[in-house]
Image (tube, rainbow, N blue to C red):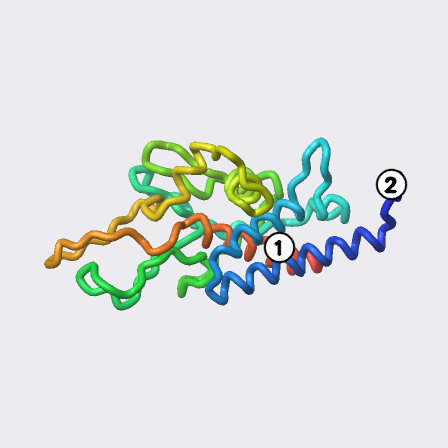
Amino acid sequence: MKIVRNVQDLEARFRDQVALLQLACENFDEGKEIAALNIATSIRVLVHDTPSSTSALTHKKSKHIDFLDSSLPKTNPNITFTGLTYYYMSNVHDGIGGIAIYRPEFTSSRPNIERWINFDQWWSQIVFQNKDGSSLSRSTLVLKAANQEGGAHIDNSIDSQYDQFRHHYSGGVIIKGTKSGVTRTFDNIPVLPALRQIGFEILESLKKAKL
């Protein structure tokens, strides 16, 4: 036998999920990038509806709110597009040493982009695209990370389209020293900071809606 939750109980569970998302984001910001998988799982619980499960935001009757779209515009179809992240390098000299990482866009020195769109537009928007045309939307990125990569489940197999974006080279940039000839990829993978950026968007959207 199951007991129907009352409004107060559903509100408390919503608050729990927001707190879990905030905690995962804080862990990421402290250098624990793997916390991005927990970010993906919290986002899934907060916004993803299926025929057999209801999101926390739908339980709260608040999925109509505006969602922050902070993705950079895609300007050149001939290069890999990573709209939620940027390239950060420090103390890299002629391709050697230092760090070279993808970081979530909200940490850049550029003014934050603020476009507000409805959930369906936001959830289905392409945020990664390779030169060959393969792409990931926010929904695909979040759900594959949560359902296949270990946020909530580790599947025996992984979607080939998602697999193209979970490697060091998948941001489309190789660093090569002019004199040394040394080549290297970035030190992390772009999907993790992209998930952190989506977490940022969710939290800012909830804040704007006073939820």
On the question of residue 122 being in view, the answer is no
For badge 1, the amino acid type reads Ser
User: How many numbered circles are shown?
Assistant: 2
Residue situated in front as seen by the camera: 77 or 162 = 162
Residue at 48% across, 35% down: 158
Residue 11 sits above or below residue 76 on the image: below
Q: Nearer the viewer, mark 2 or mark 1?
A: 2
Q: Residues within 10 Å of mark 1 (few under 14, many from 20)?
A: some
Quadrant of the drawing holding the N terminus = top right
Residue at 47% across, 33% down: 159
User: Based on the displayed image, in which of its 4 quarters is residue 101 positioned?
Assistant: bottom left
Residue at 63% across, 49% down: 66
Q: Earlier in the sequence, mark 2 or mark 1?
A: 2
Residue 58 sits above or below residue 179 on the image: above
Residue at 37% across, 45% down: 167
Q: Relative to 33, is 120 on the left or the right?
A: right
Q: Secondary structure at mark 2?
A: loop
Q: Relative to 174, is 211 on the left or the right?
A: right
Residue 48 sits above or below residue 200 on the image: above
Counting from the top left corner in percent of width and height, residue 150 is at 54, 45
User: Based on the displayed image, in which of its 4 quarters is residue 26 positioned?
Assistant: bottom right
Q: For the view shown, which residue lies furthest in the front direction?
A: 156
Contact between labelled residues 1 and 2, with CB atoms less than 8 Å apart = no
Counting from the top left corner in percent of width and height, residue 18 is at 67, 57
Q: Which residue is mark 2?
A: 2
Q: Which residue is mark 1?
A: 205
